[in-house]
Amino acid sequence: METAPTRAPPPPPPPLLLLVLYCSLVPAAASPLLLFANRRDVRLVDAGGVKLESTIVASGLEDAAAVDFQFSKGAVYWTDVSEEAIKQTYLNQTGAAAQNIVISGLVSPDGLACDWVGKKLYWTDSETNRIEVANLNGTSRKVLFWQDLDQPRAIALDPAHGYMYWTDWGEAPRIERAGMDGSTRKIIVDSDIYWPNGLTIDLEEQKLYWADAKLSFIHRANLDGSFRNMLNVPSKLCERNIHSLRDGSCARRALSSIPAGHTIRGRRWWRAASLTLLP
């Protein structure tokens, strides 16, 4: 009797080089800033600059993976997989020691998202297979999901509509959506998906974007998973991505954001984005 072929396990999540969004209350013509974690530090870079020189936000880290921010307070949050912690610092406090926000009950916190409206932190843990939420200072912590999860990965929020989205690249890879209070959980993408390694929302256009580290594509869909289509990605991008998966010498690519402009109090600000970089 023949046995069904086994599905190859995904590569270990970290290390990742993730680019995340950074907001700036500047005119629309100004270049966006990128905030990214590079394992040993968190940096800020002017994406429109010629030299792409970066400013160190936090250094001396062990294994920074996911990163997000709260613009109104200038607060930057990141997960450290090696230290099994979620930490925080401020953009205007160069050299200040990082603060521990969550240090217990974490094993592999791969995904992190800041709810800038409700003042909450959401995160995924691919080892404990949980999705949790807490206040920005780590208090009032609550497990939202712990069942029917198998390596939850990236997470993104749409606070205006009260929804959260996450990827799961376990044995049944998929993208799910639920209310930010843990209600109305629903699978919205479960076909033509393998290692969904990155996820983001274009809040202005109300579109969901994700990257697949195995199939080497970037897809876009409505927020309910409908009207899905693939973005045109340069061939070198896909080739290098496949190469990085094959020999493990490069960081896997993860989608972090898509450029989107929004108006707040009459001024234009930008959430700028890119894919992961390769060393």
Image: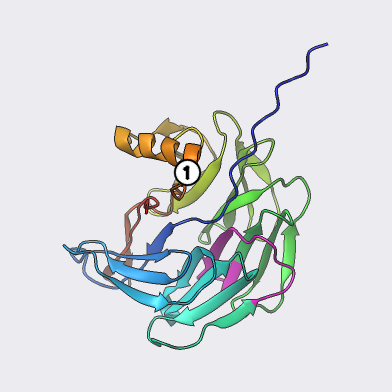
Residue at the spot x=60%, y=41% of the render? 10
Residue at the spot x=76%, y=45% of the render? 148
**Where residue 36 sits in the image (x, y, percent)?**
40, 64
For the residue carrying disc 1, how many other residues have a C-alpha within 10 Å: few (<14), some (14-19), or many (20+)? many
Residue at the spot x=35%, y=52% of the render? 274
Judge whether 167 appears above or below 43 on screen: above
**Where residue 223 sits in the image (x, y, percent)?**
51, 44
Q: Is 127 part of what is drawn in magenta?
A: no
Magenta segment boundaries in residue numbering: 102-121
Quarter of the N terminus within the rendering:
top right
Q: Is residue 217 visible?
A: no
Picture quadrant of residue 56:
bottom left
Q: Is residue 274 visible?
A: yes
Q: Amino acid at mark 1?
A: Trp
Foreground residue among 178 and 103: 103
Residue at the spot x=53%, y=67% of the render? 114
Picture quadrant of residue 44:
bottom left
**Where is mark 1, residue-wise?**
210
